[in-house]
Image: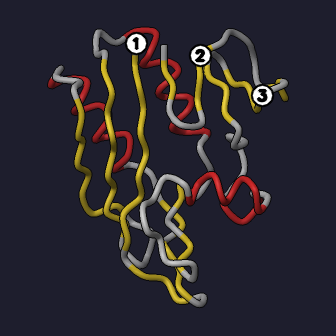
Amino acid sequence: MIKSAAWCLVAGMLALAGCGYLYGTTVSAIPFDKTYDQLTPEQKQQVRANYRNLPADLEPPFPEHGLIEITQSLDYWGNTSQVKGDVIVHVWVDAAGNPTRVQLDGDAQDASGRAKLTSLFMHLHYKPAERAGVPEDFVYYYSVSIR
């Protein structure tokens, strides 16, 4: 089972569900195929909720093509991996949207699984954080629970 603050495990295909958007075995209140700019103000607020003390004038980084690449990988991975546990992913994203470093915190100890998670987040491109329209370096946070 895979879930995060916006995710829970159910069966199905990409569709609008009563509590959010459904893809494979994952449901989210945030649409998987939307970029940050395409999110509603409420959905952007849910993204912002992952950050403590995020300045009001700072727009956080977000995967360039939305959550679909993460969702597809985690959906497949959750069904095939031996890794279980809670993981917080920290991705340092530079002002050009490139990941420069990934740190995994939490209790998932399988080295192979941690390497796969690191690779997944390092191979994405991100919308960089912006303050008053100016891109800047910042950390993208993502938490996942694999059961």
Residue 80 x, y percent position in the rendering: 40, 9
Query: Residue pushed farthest front?
Result: 53
Circle 3 sits in a helix, a strand or a loop, which is it?
loop
Instruction: Name the quadrant containing residue 97.
Output: bottom left
The C terminus - image quarter: top left
Residue 141 x, y percent position in the rendering: 41, 52
Relative vertical location of residue 90 with respect to residue 17 in this rendering, above or below: below
Would you call the spot at circle 1 few (<14 residues within 10 Å), some (14-19), or many (20 or more)?
some
- Amino acid type at image mark 3: Cys
| Lower position in the chain sequence, tag 1 or tag 3 | 3
Relative vertical location of residue 112 with respect to residue 80 in this rendering, above or below: below
What residue is disc 1 on? 147
Residue at the (69%, 43%) spot, across then down: 30
Residue 25 x, y percent position in the rendering: 62, 16
**Labels 3 & 2 near each other (Cβ < 8 A):** no
Q: Colour mode?
A: secondary structure
Residue at the (44%, 16%) spot, across then down: 78
Circle 1 sits in a helix, a strand or a loop, which is it?
loop
Residue at the (39%, 66%) spot, across then down: 98
Would you call the spot at circle 3 few (<14 residues within 10 Å), some (14-19), or many (20 or more)?
few
What residue is disc 2 on? 9
Disc 3 from disc 2: Cα separation:
12 Å
